[in-house]
Image (cartoon, rainbow, N blue to C red):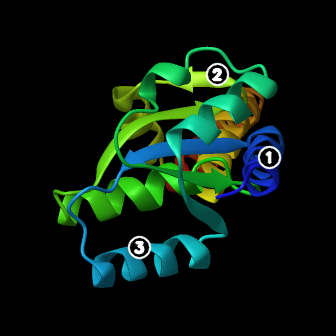
């Protein structure tokens, strides 16, 4: 690759690093062409861009993007998955795929300029979907209001039960 092409690659990787909400580095050594094709399709369906990068060019791009701690993980065959829309998608898809394909190994991740270890990536990948989390949050926020409504309506409800009991007692006496 000639120098202008290398510079263009460095610029492209730097731009992707800067724009992506999440980046996951993976070692794809040992995957067959069919497995790589399947992985790329799953990532593309999730809105994730997947690139095999040269480590030297990736190191230059990381330095230009002022990201600390990523250089040490750029060893061996490296692929980068860039998530622009959903920050959890690259981790979820790669983690799911890696469970069925032992040759794919997650190295580390980058979530909004914060370095994530392999364990943190796995925790991120096993989170429920955003919609589920929002639903759970709404339920948690709604619970105190519902409980307050129950507490405020209790005296009225108790008074109604008492009046009903008095009415039944008077009906029996009559």
Dividing the picture into quarters, in which one does residue 86 lie?
bottom right
Q: CA distance from mark 2 to mark 1?
A: 26 Å
Give the number of the disc on residue 114.
2
Where is residue 87? Give x, y as percent: 66, 47
Residue drawn where x is 16% and y is 57% of the image: 102
For marks 1 and 3, the one nearer the N-term is 1
Q: Mark 1 falls on what kind of element?
A: helix
Q: Nearer the viewer, residue 63 or 126?
A: 63
Q: CA distance from mark 1 to mark 3?
A: 28 Å
Q: CA distance from mark 3 to mark 2?
A: 25 Å
* Mark 3, residue position: 39
Residue drawn where x is 61% and y is 43% of the image: 23
Q: Nearer the viewer, residue 58 or 162?
A: 58
Q: Is residue 66 above or below residue 84?
A: above
Where is residue 26? Give x, y as percent: 40, 47
Dividing the picture into quarters, in which one does residue 152 lie?
top right
The crowd level at tag 3 (other Cα within 10 Å; few <14, some 14-19, many 20+) is: some
Left or right side of 15 for 77:
left
Confirm or deny contact between disc 3 and disc 2 (CB under 8 A): no
Residue 77 visible at all: yes
Residue drawn where x is 41% and y is 57% of the image: 94
Q: Nearer the viewer, residue 132 or 73?
A: 73
Confirm or deny contact between disc 1 and disc 3 (CB under 8 A): no
Left or right side of 167 for 127:
left
Give the number of the disc on residue 7.
1
Dividing the picture into quarters, in which one does residue 35 lie?
bottom left
Confirm or deny contact between disc 2 and disc 1 (CB under 8 A): no
The crowd level at tag 1 (other Cα within 10 Å; few <14, some 14-19, many 20+) is: some
The crowd level at tag 2 (other Cα within 10 Å; few <14, some 14-19, many 20+) is: few
Residue drawn where x is 64% and y is 33% of the image: 111
For marks 2 and 1, the one nearer the N-term is 1
**Count of numbered badges drawn on the protein:** 3
């Amino acid at each position: 690759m000639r120098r202008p092409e290398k510079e263009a690659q460095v610029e492209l990787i730097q731009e992707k690093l800067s724009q992506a909400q999440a980046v996951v580095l993976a070692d794809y050594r040992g995957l067959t062409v069919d497995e790589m094709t399947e992985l790329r399709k799953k990532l593309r369906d999730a809105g994730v861009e997947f690139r095999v990068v040269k480590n030297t060019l990736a190191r230059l791009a990381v330095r230009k993007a002022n990201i600390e701690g990523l250089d040490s993980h750029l060893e061996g065959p490296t692929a980068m998955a860039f998530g622009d829309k959903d920050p959890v998608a690259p981790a979820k898809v790669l983690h799911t795929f890696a469970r069925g394909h032992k040759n794919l190994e997650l190295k580390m991740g980058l979530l909004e300029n914060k370095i994530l270890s392999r364990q943190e990536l796995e925790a991120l990948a096993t989170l429920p979907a955003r919609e589920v989390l929002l639903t759970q949050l709404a339920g948690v926020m709604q619970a105190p209001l519902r409980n307050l409504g129950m507490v405020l309506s209790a005296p009225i409800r108790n008074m109604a039960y008492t009046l009903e009991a008095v009415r039944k007692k008077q009906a029996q006496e009559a």
